[in-house]
Image (cartoon, rainbow, N blue to C red):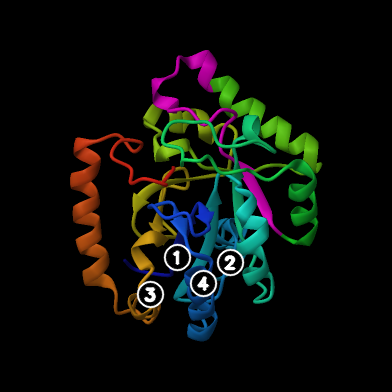
Amino acid sequence: MGGPVVDILMYHSISDRGGATSIAPAIFARQMAAIAEAGVPVITLDDYLAARDGQGQLGPHSVILTFDDGFQDFADAAWPEMSKLGFRPIVYLPTAYIGRQEGWRGIAEPPRKLMGWGTIRALFAEGVGFGSHTVSHPDLDALPEDARGAELQRSKAHIEERLSHTIRHFAPPYGIAGPEVRTEIASLYKTSVGTRLGQAGLGDDVHDLPRLEMFYFTDIARWRAHLAGRGAAYLAARKGLRAIKSAVARPWQGIAPGAGR
């Protein structure tokens, strides 16, 4: 990949619940510390867009921190670690579940609680970014056109109303968004991140940006090697295994106990 490389990190829950979508708080803290120690800058999606438009420059390697679902443990365990390091993440919210428990396919047992609007507004004031993760966390490709449009538009409008801020960024539930859905997303949002495993460059499709699932980097030595530019072989191997898994099962199938999406 020529030019700047951007690792868009994907997290869900920062807790000791176990499963593929939960990272233990102690491991998360070490992952964040490794970024700071490596001197890899943490940027925002807006910084990335500005660089694409020639309105800013990126170093050779940057990191973007993303969190799907808006779990309460983001406020309790994740944000305290990031805020002390000056990192600014983005959290994607499924608006029907704000202040409630997760209730979509592939949830954890027992279900995890999502942040309420009071917490979200307080975090926004402290520098946390927010994006849309639809209203009800569906498989968008499986919905008729009118229902898809409602999921994309209403979630955006609801967050904008609550935060008095334009919402520019989106993450499709389960990472599922075919070409038709991506066209609809592009009419409303400036970026969309999925679950395709990989690193982003300035030439990537901004409505199909790859991410690094951080469950694959709970070994801190391996994470440090990646940050130092020595992780290409491991990432290639994970991509191969991920492709096989994606070909035989939907994202919510075969999830380990305690995991969600």
Of callouts 3 and 2, which one flags the residue occurring earlier in the amino acid sequence?
2
**Foreground disc of the pair 3, 1:** 3
Residue at the disc numbered 1 = 6
Name the spot of residue 131 as percent of width and height, x first.
62, 44
* Rendered location of residue 121, percent (x, y): 79, 48
- Return the disc, 2 or 4, that comes first in the chain's sequence: 4
Q: Secondary structure at mark 4?
A: helix
Q: Which residue is mark 2?
A: 43
How far apart in space, not on screen, are marks 3 and 1 (Cα)?
15 Å
Instruction: Choose the circle earlier in sequence order: 3 or 1.
Output: 1
Badge 3 amino acid: Trp
Graded by Cα atoms within 10 Å as few (under 14), some (14 to 19) or many (20 or more), the crowding at tag 4 reads few
Choose top left, top right, bottom left or bottom right for residue 222: bottom left
Disc on the earlier residue, 4 or 3: 4
For the residue marked with disc 4, what is the amino acid? Answer: Ala
The answer to the question of whether label 2 and label 1 lie on touching residues, with beta carbons closer than 8 A, is yes
Left or right, 186 with reference to 177: right
Q: Residue at x 48, y 80 (%)?
A: 34
Determine the residue positioned at 48% across, 84% down. 38
Q: Mark 1 or mark 4, which is nearer to you?
A: 4
In the image, residue 105 sits, relative to residue 191, either above or below, namely above
Rendering coords of residue 85 (x, y %): 64, 76
